[in-house]
Image (cartoon, rainbow, N blue to C red):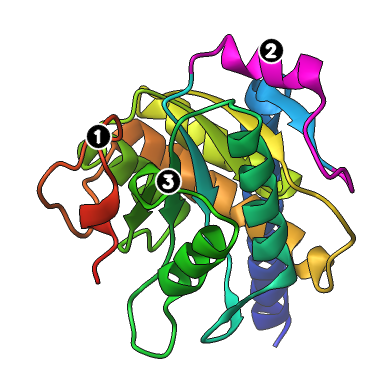
Amino acid sequence: MGKVRKFLISLLILVLLILSLGGVAVMTLSGEVMASEKDNIVYAVTDEESIPAETAEALKEQKPECIMVLGCGISDKETPTPMLRDRLETAIMLYRAGVAPKVLLTGDNGTLTHNEIHVMLKYMRDAGIPEEDIFCDHAGFSTYESMYRAVDIFCVRRMIVVTQTYHMYRSLYIAHGLGIEAVGVASDQKVYAGQAQREIREVLARVKDFFQSKSKPPATFGGEEIPITGSGVSSHGE
């Protein structure tokens, strides 16, 4: 029994050591992603109704081809979640300020009951954004796939990314890894329920996308090019 007990204690110590080293590696890679992109988050919207003129002019100097809005869930078939609503409102502010000529909506349209793009497109239309200036990526099943398809399908080379700050570091890291010149405008307009859980998941997601940005696997779906410099109507899927 003594030998068995010693073996079990040694095994437990080994497992704890491996878990500790793994935890350190995860936090190190997550921290690297955040550190490399923190200076590329150039503005954070809070409760403004418009983008300050000096900020808009600074963003225009980047010559972005579009404003990318990353999906993050819907409340029902017609309503964005509070987080997605704030992303859309931020993009509308940027578009109205003339920061970029096009808006690229990307999200999960994988099932009939969960169609983020339908909700996002309707929101943009209701805000008066011209049809031809709205582009829709129906196969943005993940942040990585959204960025990959931005290059592969929509031929984007320069853009502004709109999402909340916690998610922005990873979004920009992927974009830069795929050769996109990108800066971020964060849409943190309120404190959102469930943020602690999202922060924990995001640490692991940063590690996953750290490696994906290096290996550059293709997106799940390809397709014909719809250049962001043209009309987006054909991408609406209606």
Decide which of tag 3 and tag 1 comes sooner along the chain: 3
Q: Which residue type carries mark 1?
A: Gly
Calculate the distance from the C-alpha at mark 2 to the C-alpha at mark 1.
24 Å
Residue drawn at point x = 58 percent, y = 37 percent: 95
Q: What residue is shown with label 2? A: 58
Total marks shown come to 3
**Depth check, front residue: 131 or 143:** 131
Q: Position of residue 52 (x, y in %)?
A: 82, 25
Give the extent of the magenta segment: 46-63
Residue drawn at point x = 56 percent, y = 64 percent: 126
Answer whether residue 86 is magenta in the image.
no
Q: Quadrant of residue 60?
A: top right
User: Residue 104, labelled with which disc?
Assistant: 3
User: Residue 230, labelled with which disc?
Assistant: 1
Q: Which residue type carries mark 3?
A: Leu
Q: Are marks 3 and 1 in contact (CB under 8 Å)?
A: no
Decide which of tag 2 and tag 3 comes sooner along the chain: 2
**Depth check, front residue: 130 or 159:** 130
Q: Secondary structure at mark 2?
A: helix
Q: Is residue 147 above or below residue 89?
A: above
Residue drawn at point x = 69 percent, y = 12 percent: 58
Q: Is residue 149 above or below residue 82?
A: above
User: Residue 127, labelled with which disc?
Assistant: none
Furthest-left residue in view?
224
Q: Secondary structure at mark 1?
A: loop
Q: Position of residue 35 (x, y in %)?
A: 70, 25
